[in-house]
Amino acid sequence: MLTHGFDLPRMLLLAPVLLFSLTFHEFAHAWIALKLGDPTAAREGRVSLNPLRHLDPIGTIAIFLFGFGWAKPVPINPYFLKGQARDFALTAVAGPAANIVAALGFGIIFRLLDLAHVGGFLLLIATLGVYINLALAAFNLIPIPPLDGSRVVYYLLPRNLAAEYIRLEPFGMWIILGLLLLDSRTNIIGSWLWLIVRVFGGLFAGPGFQV
């Protein structure tokens, strides 16, 4: 998940929406895995909307200090899944899908508040809900292992190419970190997030939505 660095007043507003968005994302991974036959995450109490079940202490602090962080990965055992590669991809895409659903919900709230000419704190929370959930979905759909988008690419690739592709996983976080460090110059990730937020934010929340 990306934000824009540390700013205490803004972070105090972001915190509740961030906690909800990260929790809902991880809950969706765990819930879909259970529905597809893998009880691993459920046994660890991860089919829960309790943020304490999902937040990684270091990753959470990193979000607020550096604008980049993570939650605890949901454990998935593909050997429990009936259609292993397909169901593994479905469990992966469940997280971003949950954030898109949440963004839609916040977008509807934004529209209702906007129609009622209600501004201030409530409208700001709705705006943040749309923005954060769309940014979280877009970031996790980047096809670099171990991000969620890589699981979908792995499923779609021919078997020989998929085997080569998944070998990137030990280096994936370093690749992502490198891209983030270079993003102030290249703006590759920033442009991708901005595109998704602008297009779907306007679609979900209407013309009054601004980021």
Image: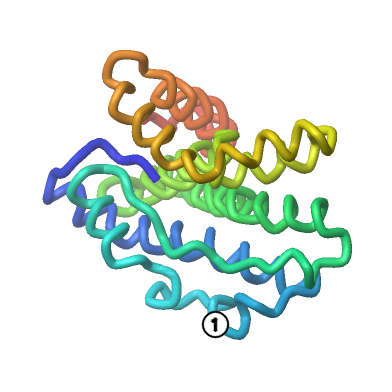
* Mark 1 secondary-structure assignment: loop
Q: Position of residue 142 (x, y in %)?
A: 55, 34
Q: Which residue is mark 1?
A: 44
Q: Position of residue 45 (x, y in %)?
A: 54, 83
Within 10 angstroms of label 1, few (less than 14), some, or many (20 or more) residues?
few
Q: Residue furthest left?
A: 8
Q: Quadrant of the C terminus?
A: top left
- Residue 111 in view (yes/no): no
Name the side, left or right, on which 37 lies relative to 195.
right
Which amino acid type is marked by label 1? Glu
Q: Residue at x 66, y 71 (%)?
A: 31
Placement of 148 over or under 53, stated as above or below: above
Placement of 91 over or under 33, stated as above or below: above
Q: Position of residue 57 (x, y in %)?
A: 28, 67
- Residue 139 in view (yes/no): yes
Q: Quadrant of the N terminus?
A: top left
Q: Nearer the viewer, residue 128 or 108?
A: 128
Q: Residue at x 44, y 77 (%)?
A: 53
Name the side, left or right, on which 78 lies relative to 131.
right
Q: Nearer the viewer, residue 75 or 141?
A: 75
